[in-house]
């Protein structure tokens, strides 16, 4: 089971989050049939969205969206407070050659563009508040660096963000996935940031650690080195979509009687696909006629 941990470090000068998301990303790749590089990009954003969601309190739904100028066209990840996440790549077949270092060249697929973070709240109480939207230009296309840039520019939080997805040539294709988010709180000693930067620079990549069996706590130990930390919360993570047959029916009903009648006479039914999870919902003519009668 995938997990995320939240904690504090260095006598509450640092906020830390880490996650193992292998099964989450594996499910997303299976559903969307993404190319290797698109899988890496989507997996990084799904993990980043879960880490970001754990760092905020004032939201019910957090959406991280990359409007990419490169071949991917865009990536969307949506997370909630319960550890559920869903998402997709607009062009799942886009791919790229490995970089000179043998890494996925996600930046070439993303290209330029914008990163948007949307926090929506009030749903649990039946309210519909205006969402908070923060946007920054893409600085590298590597996603982890772009999320760190967002946190610094829009939230004024100096942060270190580590995200990774490791794939294999045999099924299941996702061998390891996870990430770490470290945030310097107001008044934190600048020396701590230097220590963390040095430690991260000399540590194995998060996916190498996860492949060897590392837990989220192990990832924090590797990133923080000698800096002590305390885990405050552990929560399960999963790829989970909130689509359903009932939601599909409601969307079709909202199209109006004339459109539904056209589906019956011309198409002998209707099919709806969920962009977030690729689930398909089919309604035959009798079910469409029942919708007309209810309306």
Image: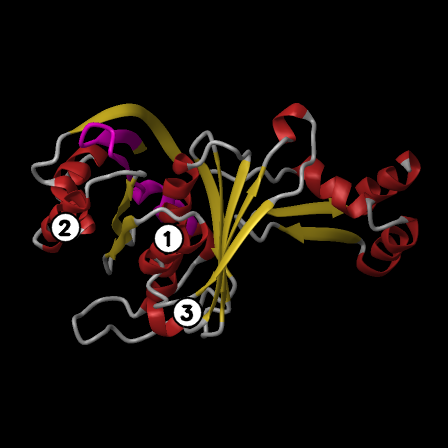
Residue at the image point whose x is 89% and y is 34% from the top: 294
For label 1, the residue is 152
Residue 1 appears in view: no
The circle on residue 194 is 2
Task: Using the numbered discs, state the Cα–Cα distance from disc 2 to disc 1 in whole angstroms.
Answer: 17 Å
Residue at the image point whose x is 70% and y is 52% from the top: 271
Classify residue 271 as left or right of residue 101.
right
Q: Position of residue 292 (x, y in %)?
A: 90, 41
The colour mode here is: secondary structure
Q: Quadrant of the N terminus?
A: top left
The picture quadrant where one finds residue 107 is bottom left
Q: Secondary structure at mark 2?
A: helix
For label 3, the residue is 110
Mark 2 is surrounded, within 10 Å at the Cα level, by few (under 14), some (14 to 19) or many (20 or more) other residues, namely: few
From which residue to which does the magenta span run? Answer: 5-28
> Disc 1 or 3, which lies upstream in sequence?
3
Say if the magenta span includes residue 13. yes
Q: Is residue 84 above or below residue 95?
A: above
Residue at the image point whose x is 82% and y is 44% from the top: 253
Contact, mark 3 vs mark 2 (Cβ under 8 Å): no
Q: Position of residue 231 (x, y in %)?
A: 24, 25
């Amino acid at each position: 089971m995938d997990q995320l941990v939240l904690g504090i470090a260095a006598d509450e000068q640092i906020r830390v989050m880490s996650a193992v998301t292998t099964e989450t990303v594996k499910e997303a790749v299976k559903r969307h049939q993404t190319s290797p590089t698109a899988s890496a990009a989507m997996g990084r954003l799904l993990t980043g969205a879960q880490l970001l969601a754990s760092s905020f309190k004032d939201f019910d739904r957090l959406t991280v969206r990359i409007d990419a100028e490169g071949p991917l066209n865009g990536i969307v990840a949506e997370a909630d407070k319960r550890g559920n996440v869903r998402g997709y790549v607009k062009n799942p077949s886009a791919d790229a050659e490995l970089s000179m270092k043998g890494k996925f060249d996600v930046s070439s697929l993303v290209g330029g563009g914008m990163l948007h973070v949307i926090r929506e709240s009030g749903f649990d109480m039946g309210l519909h508040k205006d969402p908070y939207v923060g946007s920054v230009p893409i600085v590298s296309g590597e996603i982890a660096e772009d999320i760190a840039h967002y946190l610094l520019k829009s939230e004024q939080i100096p942060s270190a963000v580590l995200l990774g997805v490791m794939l294999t040539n045999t099924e299941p294709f996702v061998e390891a996935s996870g990430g770490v988010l470290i945030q310097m709180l107001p008044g934190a000693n600048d020396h701590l940031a230097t220590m963390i930067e040095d430690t991260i620079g000399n540590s194995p990549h998060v996916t190498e650690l996860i492949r060897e069996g590392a837990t989220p706590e192990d990832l924090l130990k590797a990133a923080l080195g000698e800096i002590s930390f305390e885990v405050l919360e552990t929560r399960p993570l999963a790829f989970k979509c909130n689509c359903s047959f009932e939601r599909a029916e409601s969307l079709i009903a909202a199209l109006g009687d004339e459109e539904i009648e056209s589906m019956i006479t011309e198409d002998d039914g209707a099919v709806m696909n969920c962009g977030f999870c690729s689930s398909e919902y089919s309604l035959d003519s009798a079910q469409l006629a029942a919708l007309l009668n209810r309306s």
